[in-house]
Amino acid sequence: MPSRVTLGVTGGIAAYKGAELTRLLQTRGYDVQVVMTRAAEQFIQPLTFAALTGHKVLTSLWDDTTNTAEGSIEHIAVAQATDLLLVAPATANTLAKFAHGLADDFLSTLYLATTAPTIVAPAMNVNMLHHPATQANLATLRARNVTIVEADAGYLACGMTGDGRLADLNLIVEAVEQALHPKHDLTSETVLITAGGTREPLDPVRFLGNRSSGKMGYALAEAALTRGAKVVLISAPTALTPPTGCEFVPIVEAEEMHRAVLEHLPRATIVIAAAAVADFRPTAVAPDKIKRSGNLSLTLVPTEDIVAAAVDQRRPGTRVIAFAAETTLDLAAARQKLARKGADAIVLNDISLPGLGFDSDSNAAVWITPDAQADLPATTKRLLADRILDQTLALPLPSKL
């Protein structure tokens, strides 16, 4: 029996894309049940979805069958029958209902009643998306393990340009696939991941650091765990909670990360260096807080090259993946960095792009090996993590010590 995906369509201009999304889900073998809000009916007729799916489209808690026992609990029956709830497009209003537990229509009631995985794909005006209320609601849903397929940036129906466009439909379908059919292809692997931004102290109060949130590294750890790997997460300070099930090694400075990586390297079969490691540290750390007294000069020395050390000391068969967070996509410079470090691949991402990179939940990258490259389009860091793991597994096993 095919998996049942309940598709919630809410009242935004992107509602018309629900018809194509339904077809894409059906081509993957899913049985699609559509639930529409009243506002969605202003953009596309329920008959369209009924014709595509062969199912009655659910639009209200109150219809002609509600005087029967079956009709009065229809939302419960649908909640129990569905294998996954997907809401695309998800308006600001629907996100607010979900986050605050409001249940005043079929879709919001269904969300509270189902225990199935839930995926939402926001689509709205850029200012609505970035309003603190909407961002807080999205954060609440993430904390409840709702998967967010981040909105794209581009020209919006309202005439503005910015974030808020419904994500590419193939990315949404990919999120459904990962939720319903998670891979278990890393069960024989031990994945060592570095994350976060190291801090190099100047005195007991100040440090040299960077803006890395650690989200990419933590997403990689979560993805590897989901796919059955043993995960060692070596992390500089972040505001994130380590994924349940990983071996967590907290560090602060680049030198500490260097030692931790070499300590755990002998049992690693994959190393992914996603941390933003400081390139320099002060030659000396002041024992007391440095007082403000005019100009201050610092003498800096390079920190350890952790990736190069891992490549040099890895056992045969261990793949090493480097990261390069840059302000431009300089492919030639990335290739030079890859050759200099001797890694098997490098993930190049432009952190200057709006909505991507540091502090964001989305990212885009270019996967580069010595003889090839592949674009990894913008998506959530969690989905990008799986793509990086897919590329890693496709690499030939290195034999050189």
Image: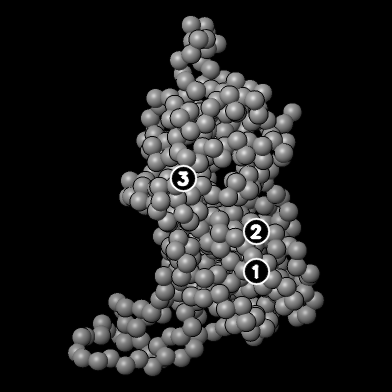
Q: Quadrant of residue 394?
A: bottom right
Q: Nearer the viewer, residue 302 or 4?
A: 4
Going by the numbered disc 2, the residue's amino acid type is: Arg
Residue drawn at (72%, 31%) of the image: 2
Q: Earlier in the sequence, mark 1 or mark 2?
A: 1
Going by the numbered disc 1, the residue's amino acid type is: Trp
Task: Answer with left or right where residue 178 lies relative to residue 79.
Answer: right
Q: Residues within 10 Å of mark 2 (few under 14, many from 20)?
A: some
From the top left corner, tell me how far across and down residue 393 is, in percent.
73, 62
Going by the numbered disc 3, the residue's amino acid type is: Ala
Q: Dot 3: what SS?
A: loop
Q: Quadrant of the C terminus?
A: bottom right
Q: Earlier in the sequence, mark 1 or mark 3?
A: 3
Residue drawn at (53%, 61%) of the image: 363
Marks 1 & 2, CB-CB < 8 Å contact: yes
Q: Is residue 269 visible?
A: yes
Distance CA(mark 1)–CA(mark 2): 10 Å
Using the image, determine if residue 174 lies above or below residue 384: above
Using the image, determine if residue 283 lies above or below residue 219: below
